[in-house]
Image (cartoon, grey):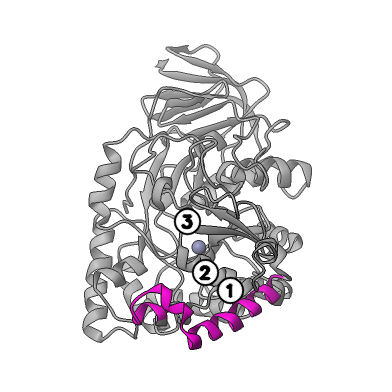
Amino acid sequence: MTFDLLIRGGTVVDGTGAEGFAGDVGIVGDRIHAIGDLSAADFRDVIDATGLIVAPGFVDVHNHASGEMEGGILNIPSVENQVRQGVTTLISGNCGGSPWPIGEHLDAVDALPIRQNYGLLVGMGTIRAEVEVDAEPASPEEVARMQELAARAMAEGAFGMSTGYFPDFVTTDEIAQVARPIAEAGGVYATHMRDESERLLDALREAIAIGERSGCPVQISHIKCWGTRAWGLADQALALIDDARDRGLDIAADRYPYVASFSGVAYIVPLDARIDAATRGGIEHLRDDDLAERVRAGVEDFVEVLDGADNIVFAPLEPMPEIDGKSLAQVAEERGEEPWRVALELTIEGSVSCIYFSMREENVRAFMRHPAVFAGSDGHLRVLGRGVSHPRNYGTFPRWIGHYGRDEGLFGVEEVVRKCAFMPARKFGLHDRGELAQRKIADLAIFSWEDIIDTATFDDPHHYPEGIPHVIVAGVPAVRDGEATDETPGRVVRLSR
Ligand SMILES: [Zn+2]
């Protein structure tokens, strides 16, 4: 036997949680052909993994690679910020928004040079917009039409459906009904819950109910206790998940290893006020007296929940030096305006995002440690050095492993690799990935347990991590000796049952 690529002399950590062992990995074409002592084998190419961990490539099921202006895969297909972390598969289309039609988008991406594999969820917000449902509960006919589109998305290769940012008029019942064809096609229901703050537990109960009524496995996206009023709820949230699992529901959650989130500035402004402004003809109607009063009350409450306007830091998508990197408190003071007025005007201006320091470290750890929680970045694609960024775009997986696993002692290498590769792959139906075994696809992350670490920070977010010298995608080195290669071996992946 001659291997196309032999990974020699490393410690194989196969992803299942089983103890690592000294062994070689022999690859033929895009598949793993053998694992063990292959020192006598012939090979066309070899990577020396002495002193390194040979693991399945990491699977990031929560990211926004599909969209968001210049951060979308159609515009910057071969950026390195994900693959340099050891990520070999991305599942995008999260938080309720996705490209449409799914099949057309996947075909377009398939024709591009991508470094890692790429698949999609369909966003229910996208489906709802396609059916042109008004700002009210959907009629039975509209629900039926949405079910058709959901079924079509699954037929075109989606891995499931996502929801996010839904106002109250989108009912639990409506979501459960639209999720039914997703369940029938074997997809997951991934939800950015309706509330991650003081109504976190109600939102979690709703997500569980949707799973139980529709038959969908549930994925809680970026599980968090958002803001001071939710900080005490982590244990109760995890108990709800445990209870649902005891009843037989397949429910899991993903988590990025940071205490700040990232969203548009509009997030500060109450959703119902934004909807009313749009109904009146445009977002500038937020300045109408009655709406402005609601914005004032909403923003003041928001700031209180975040324990002060210092904890909201502007990160504009286009350069805006007068606010870039400054807090809402700072900008309000410089402009001599109340924070709510600044938030209102920047919402109307658009294209301004914020980093919200909204979480407590001990909750982040409690979630990460829970047996049903695994890694997910909630990140975007980024060109190194260009534009606004959250450190999770570069550092999620090495930070799970190097900072929380090795340095903080939360996980051993076997357990953290399981949370970065095997668990997300199994949950999303990627049965050929996330595990090193014979006949699995040869997606591998080869890293140093001693050296792996994230280097991107909130102040200086554009840095690739360290300690991940080689990343193999479908048998081809996408990163070698710490540098991206000229190869773009990534493929579009579609759910197959
Ligand atoms: Zn989200």
140 or 385: which is nearer to us?
385
Horizontal arrangement in the rendering, residue 236 relative to residue 436 (left or right): right
The residue wearing badge 1 is 341
- The residue lying toward the viewer, choosing from 304 and 248, is 304
Residue 392, magenta (yes or no): no
**Which residue in the protein does label 3 denote?**
427
Q: Name the dominant secondary structure of the magenta segment.
A: helix
Q: Is mark 1 within 8 Å of ligand 1?
A: no
Mark 2 Cα shell of 10 Å, populated few (<14), some (14-19), many (≥20): some
Tell whether label 2 touches label 3 (CB within 8 Å).
no
**Residue at (30%, 83%) from the top-left corner?**
138
Q: Which residues are the magenta region?
A: 277-306
Q: Are marks 2 and 1 in contact (CB under 8 Å)?
A: yes
Figure quadrant of the C terminus? bottom left
Real-space Cα separation, disc 3 to disc 1, in angstroms: 44 Å
Q: Amino acid at mark 2?
A: Glu
Residue 305: in magenta span: yes
Q: Earlier in the sequence, mark 3 or mark 2?
A: 2
Query: What residue is at 41 percent from the left and 42 percent from the top?
Result: 432
Query: In the rendered image, which residue does mark 2 sit on?
Result: 345
Q: Mark 3 falls on what kind of element?
A: helix
Q: CA distance from mark 3 to mark 2?
A: 42 Å
Badge 3, how many Cα within 10 Å: few under 14, some, many 20+?
some
